[in-house]
Image (spheres, helix red, strand yellow):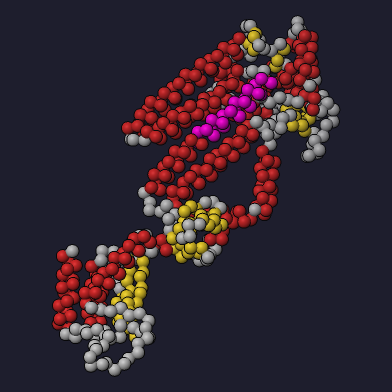
Amino acid sequence: MRITLLILLLGISGLLKGQKKDTVSYNLATPYDAVITHLQYLQPDSYYPEIASKALKNEGRSNEEIVSLSIKLKQIFDGSGEEIEIDEIPRTPNYIDSTNNRARYIVSKKFPDLYLEKYGSRWKYSAKSVKKIDALHADIYPFGTAKLLHLLPPNSGGFKLFGLWGWQLAGILILIIICVVLHKIFTLVIEKLIIQILLRMGYRKLADEVVIPVAKPISFLIIFPILIVFVPVLQLPISMSKYVIIALKAIWPVFAIVFFYRLVDIFSLYLSKMAEKTESTLDDQLVPLLRKVLKTFVVIVGGLFILDNLEFDITGLIAGISIGGLAFALAAQDTIKNFFGSLMIFVDRPFQVGDWITSGDVDGTVEEVGFRSTRIRTFRNSVMYIPNGVITNQMIDNHGLRVYRRFMTNISLTYDTPPDLIEVFVDGLKEIVKKHPKTRKDYYEIHFNNMGASSLDVLFYIFFEVPTWTEELRSRHEVLLEVVKLAENLGVNFAFPTQTLHVETFPEKKGNSPEYTKNTPELRKKLEEFLATKRAQ
């Protein structure tokens, strides 16, 4: 098709050589003839813009304005790299668009506002299309680059190399030099200024591992848009311009992906610093998981941008992903349930790594919280993996969040223990609790509480203010050891389940029951001596 069009244009240009402008003929009988008339008379070898402008509907515009608009229209196609499919243009004078039942033909899918309409017996670019030309031209040539087109030769001139005119080769060389200079400047600014600031602030790891690799992608993020803006000004051959622009637009998101990929590392490093300041250990595990999610999101979005710039129809792809996602969601309900369960754990924080929890039949210490399951180390030293969707629907008893750890026991005394001795012993137990550094002082219960089958029971109900089970056991050991020492000092006998057969005491033999001191002042003196010994220690 392109070869046929080229031969056609070259043949027409050959016939036109030596002819005067006013003797050149044109035809607008069909949409095909209108497009050919517009494009062929703006070729370097047959440059007659006045004839080309005949393909545009002129309503109240001067000849100079309509000629300028015809040139801009071709520049729109050339600058955007849009190739007109000549062979697909209707060649019948009575063409009707089936979608709207009108004599209309859209020349390019990329520019649906540019269409031909039939006026009488002639096909021309519609009046509405002519009004859109200036706006579309400004989009293709922004930031005043359209003014450069007036400074460049509109037709052939000078020498030609590799199918390009000399001024086009010079323009390419100038663009390359500008890009290299800008790249050096941006890289120097980032590496010298920003990195020096980070080093002075003590962020050497951030500078070496994150910022330096990001320096070049940042400069390319700025350079490639400059190339995309200025390449259309060179008015390259339509096929070359198309692939150059597509390549530039496809490569640019790659550097954007690299930049935002590294930016996620910087953001994650900041979150890690923030997580270190909190007591919760869940934050420390949330940061790497969040980093993976953000990096995956950056890659997916960047990939879609690349496909879109390569002129793939991503609408169908996104729709397919949506339908596939729905099917996947139905097939993976448990996985999704566990994923949202993990989010609830990170949001509600019912436990954190290191906590001792009880949930259903599970009893152990939390080692890791993942996106699918929670790993718990049981007291048998086995490892259990509980799906997050299950654990969030169960009652969780978090022993790790306890401020105080309760300790309750009954201290059993023998039935022959005198009341005064019991009272002094209970007072001694209270003093032990008050003196221990790890016990709760504002609340404890120590009372003669029960008369059992074989013992007099003293309720010993206290709390330890310790963070771990190991320290709780150590504190229990210390308190119980003091209780035993107190009992030994006061002469208190601990009871155990027994059956006693009482027989009359023989005169020549003493009974088995111990002889207790029944003098309360003497017992108080022994208690004070015991406490004084502890103070001295």
Magenta segment, prevailing SS (helix, strand or loop): helix
Q: Is residue 254 magenta?
A: yes
Instruction: Pinpoint residue 400: horizontal percent, then vertical percent.
Output: 41, 61
Residue visible at 56% across and 23% down? 227
Residue visible at 57% across and 12% down? 170
Residue visible at 32% across and 62% down? 474
- Please identify the quadrant where the C terminus is shown: bottom left
Instruction: Pinpoint residue 309: horizontal percent, then vertical percent.
Output: 63, 32
Instruction: Pinpoint residue 164: horizontal percent, then vertical percent.
Output: 64, 12
| Drawn side of residue 430 relative to residue 24, left or right | left
Q: Is residue 261 above or below residue 243?
A: below
Instruction: Pinpoint residue 32: horizontal percent, then vertical percent.
Output: 79, 24
Viewer-closest of 261 and 105 = 261
Q: Is residue 465 magenta?
A: no
Viewer-closest of 513 and 51 = 513
Viewer-closest of 3 and 376 = 376
Q: Is residue 76 visible?
A: no
Q: Is residue 38 above or below residue 95?
A: above
Magenta span of residues: 239-260
The image quarter in which residue 61 lies: top right
- Please identify the quadrant where the N terminus is shown: top right
| Drawn side of residue 530 relative to residue 270, left or right | left
| Drawn side of residue 70 relative to residue 430, left or right | right
Viewer-closest of 85 and 195 = 195
